[in-house]
Image (cartoon, rainbow, N blue to C red):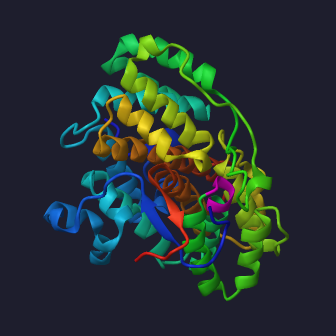
Amino acid sequence: MITDVIDHLAGITPGSPLDQLRDRRPGAREHAQRSFDALFSPDSEGEVTLVERDAVAAFVTGLHRDGRVAAFYAYRLAALAPGLLTAVETEIKEGRTTGPYGIYPADGPLAAESDEGLRYRVSDPDALGARLTAAFEHAHLLVFRPREASRQALDALSLAGWTTTGIVTLSQLVAFLSFQVRVVTGLRLLNQKGSAA
Amino acid sequence: MTGFTQEQLGWEPWLAPLAEDELTDVHHEALIDKGRAASPYFRLLARDPEILHARTLTDNDIFYNADGGLPRAERELAATATSRHNGCVFCASVHARFASHYSKHPGDVQRLLDEGVAAPQAGRWRAVIDASVALAATPEQLGPEHVANLRANGLDELAILDTIHAAAFFNWANRLMLSLGEPTEKATK
């Protein structure tokens, strides 16, 4: 039983210097885990099914190309909806790029900082279905070009059947994973040889 | 659209927040701070109170836990640099004001906003900004050299953990805020 997902993914063992260091920020530690629990085993599914949550998580973490984190979420998806795994892996391959990038409004003060990149569209919408297709395209937007998020992007979600509350949960899910994978990356670096005890 | 600024901005949701009179005890508990009931951003997030509650308490410990580690000014600097790099004008405005207030170096903060994350900064600020920017990349580009540079600039292990937490947290905050609405020139509560 994994009691702390970040410890598990970063390879932190009980009683180790990193374990003790994380305890100096007990609220961050406890509530990062509670955030995971709220998103992946909520009191009620609400407007986003558990399969959708795990599928989006497998996609988002696959885009971040951290083998251990991606495998963790792929395994969860495989346990819950094995039929979706191949489709999600295909989309991860199609969606991989490096960010953040994106364009700013051409008539605005940041136009000179616009930086074009992949504008991902799901390659096999039939395999994912309409709701997950829209969710993956929105997740890719938030992962790589968050500056381009727009009212129109939310309209695309609602056309695919996402409710207002469902969109809030989906946004939290993608945003939380963006946090979690980065904390894991940082903790692993602190765990490397040469760090002080 | 406004550029990066330390001025007070408003924020307008693209989706309907809960109305203040729709908030139940569960929502109020999730908001943690009573004043947040006035904010359309937090009333929109209150639609999923379970994750809002956990998110808010994560946020509070990362930025407000004053038991050693990175000074508040530099936690806010990491938040500002991350927001500047990801393109969250609203988030950057709030945390640039905090960074200026706590550091008493508003000019250095303004240069970060005006010229971007590569603008010249002194050693310790340089190290915090570079680590934050590297961590904001997807896939992340944070490496041992960034950690070594933070150590060389006097950060202990807890201060480095705070840098990682603050920068990582704004990859959450930026995406949430950018996903759900936009900044306006007129300040809202």
Decide whether residue A39 is among the magenta residues.
Answer: no
If the image is split into quadrants, where does the C terminus of chain A sit? bottom right
Q: Give the range drawn in magenta.
A: B83-87
Q: In this view, does A6 lie to the left or right of B38?
A: right
| Residue drawn where x is 40% and y is 47% of the image | A172
Q: Position of residue A180 (x, y in %)?
A: 49, 47
Q: Nearer the viewer, residue A45 or A159?
A: A159
Q: In which quarter of the image is residue B120?
A: bottom right
Visible in this render: residue B162?
Answer: no
The residue located at (21%, 62%) in the rendering is: B27
Relative vertical location of residue B179 with respect to residue B130 in this rendering, above or below: above
Q: Where is residue A42 in the image (x, y as percent from the top left)?
A: 24, 42
Q: Where is residue B52 in the image (x, y as percent from the top left)?
A: 32, 57
Q: Residue at x 65, y 84 (%)?
A: B103
Counting from the top left corner in percent of width and height, residue B180 is at 44, 52
In the image, residue B129 sits, relative to residue A151, either above or below, namely: below
Predominant SS along the magenta part: helix
| Furthest residue toward bottom | B104
- Image quarter where the N terminus of chain A lies is top left
Residue A107 seen by the camera: yes
Residue drawn at (55%, 34%) of the image: A140
